Each structure stands twice: as structure tokens, then as C-alpha cells.
Image (tube, helix red, strand yellow):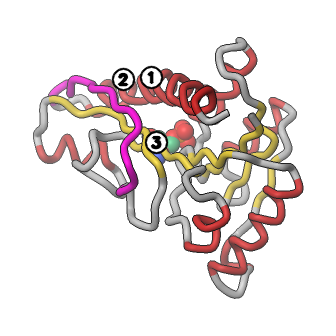
Amino acid sequence: TKIAVFASGSGSNFQAIQEAISRGELNATIELVITDKPGAYVVTRAQNCGIPVVELAPKNFADKAAYEAKLIKLLKEREIEWIILAGYMRLVGETLLAAYEHRIINIHPSLLPSFPGKDAIGQAMAHGVKVTGVTVHYVDAGMDTGKIISQGAVDVIDGDREATEERIHKLEHALYTRTLQQLFNAKK
Ligand code: GRF
């Protein structure tokens, strides 16, 4: 299964997916990493794994449709079947959604539909919930609103954001690769 990973930041989920592939736990190849944030740490991670990475700043395009048309060209050239969002901090527009219908997946660090959008972990802690978690879902035009595929729960450690965050990221890395494997097997 040929996949592309889209990321805007650190890329720890990218790395977890790549390591699962190397261990033979996920039957896929990351053909391409795309970032909308030139210089993001995910670029270094991709280079260290020898995976092609494209850095594209949307502001250099006339509009979102033009930016996404360029993405689609890159994806089609490499026969990408699935787009895996991993900390991609941008709404996917109708151009890309139409080209990859039901083939774009995201991971979000909360139990959706609670705490969509930015800083979901901070939102959950500010709200005082005792259990939060991770959601893998299909991407639609909304902000973290697509159909839920899998979830896992994480206990909040009161007042300790760092420890809570660490647990959430650990679960993300495990849940994402497990869920992707199930999806790829089912949709062959
Ligand atoms: C993760 O928490 C993911 O759920 C969210 O953005 C973060 C990305 O982390 N969408 P990383 O770049 O994969 O380390």
C-alpha cells in the first residue's frame, strides 16, 4: 500500500509509522512526506529515513485549490493510495477531498467529538476531564469532524500536562499503526 504522510511539525507519528513498517508490522511504504511548513522537524526525520520529502508553503500559491492541485500532481506521480495526516495543521479543501475520497485519515489527541481543533490536550486539561484519549478518523471538510475509525482512552494525570501528553503520544503511535494496518487489509 503506497502512502503519503502530511505533517506540519515534529513528525513523531510519521516516525512511528515508518518504524512499524520497518518492523514488518504495517504492510505499506511511505513514498512521500509532504509538509506545509518548510523547515519543520519532520523534514529532518524523513531525510534521516531516506524518504522523499516535499516542502510546500501554501502562501506561494494563488489559492487553496492551486496548492492542492500541486499536491495531487505529486501524489498521482507516485501512485499514492492513502493520505495519512500526522500533525498536519491545515484543513483539507474540496480539491484534495474529491481526489482522495475516503482515503484521507487523521489522528487527533482527544476523544472526539470532545476538544476538536488546536491544543486538544490543553483544552481537555483546562476542562478538568479525568479521561481523554486519541481518535483516528476519516477526514472531511470540517475540523476533526469525519467518521471515527478507532479510539483509545488515556487517564489524565491531574496538573501534569507533560506526563499526560507523553501517554497520549505513546498511545497515538501504537493506535495509528494498528488502525492503518486494519484499514489497508480491509480495503485491498
Ligand atoms: C499529534 O498529537 C497529532 O494527534 C496531532 O498533532 C500532533 C502531531 O505530533 N494532530 P507529531 O508531529 O506526529 O509528533
- Label 1 to label 2, Cα distance in Å? 5 Å
Dot placed on the residue nearer the N-terminal end, 1 or 3: 3
| Residue 82 pos. (x, y %) | 67, 46
| Residue 157 on the magenta segment | yes
- Label 1 to label 3, Cα distance in Å? 13 Å
Residue plotted at (27% across, 26% down): 153
- Label 3 to label 2, Cα distance in Å? 15 Å
Give the SS element for disc 2: helix
What numbered label is drawn on residue 167?
2
Instruction: Name the mark nearer the viewer: 3 or 2.
Output: 3
Give the SS element for disc 3: strand
Given residues 1 and 114, the one toward you in this image is: 1
Instruction: Name the mark nearer the viewer: 1 or 3.
Output: 3
Q: Which residues are magenta?
A: 145-158
| Residue 2 pos. (x, y %) | 77, 39
* Quarter of the rendering occupied by the N terminus: top right
What numbered label is drawn on residue 107?
3
Q: Which residue is mark 1?
A: 170
In this picture, residue 140 sits left or right of residue 181 = left
| Residue 131 pos. (x, y %) | 18, 29
Q: Quadrant of residue 171?
A: top left
Image height of 65 relative to 55, above or below? below
Give the SS element for disc 1: helix
Task: State the residue lying farthest toward the bottom.
Answer: 62
Residue plotted at (67% across, 64% down): 99
| Residue 76 on the magenta segment | no
Residue type pointed to by label 1:
Lys
Mark 3 C-beta closer than 8 Å to ligand 1: yes
Dot placed on the residue nearer the N-terminal end, 3 or 2: 3
Residue type pointed to by label 2:
Arg
Q: Are marks 1 and 2 in contact (CB under 8 Å)?
A: yes
Q: Quadrant of residue 75?
A: bottom right
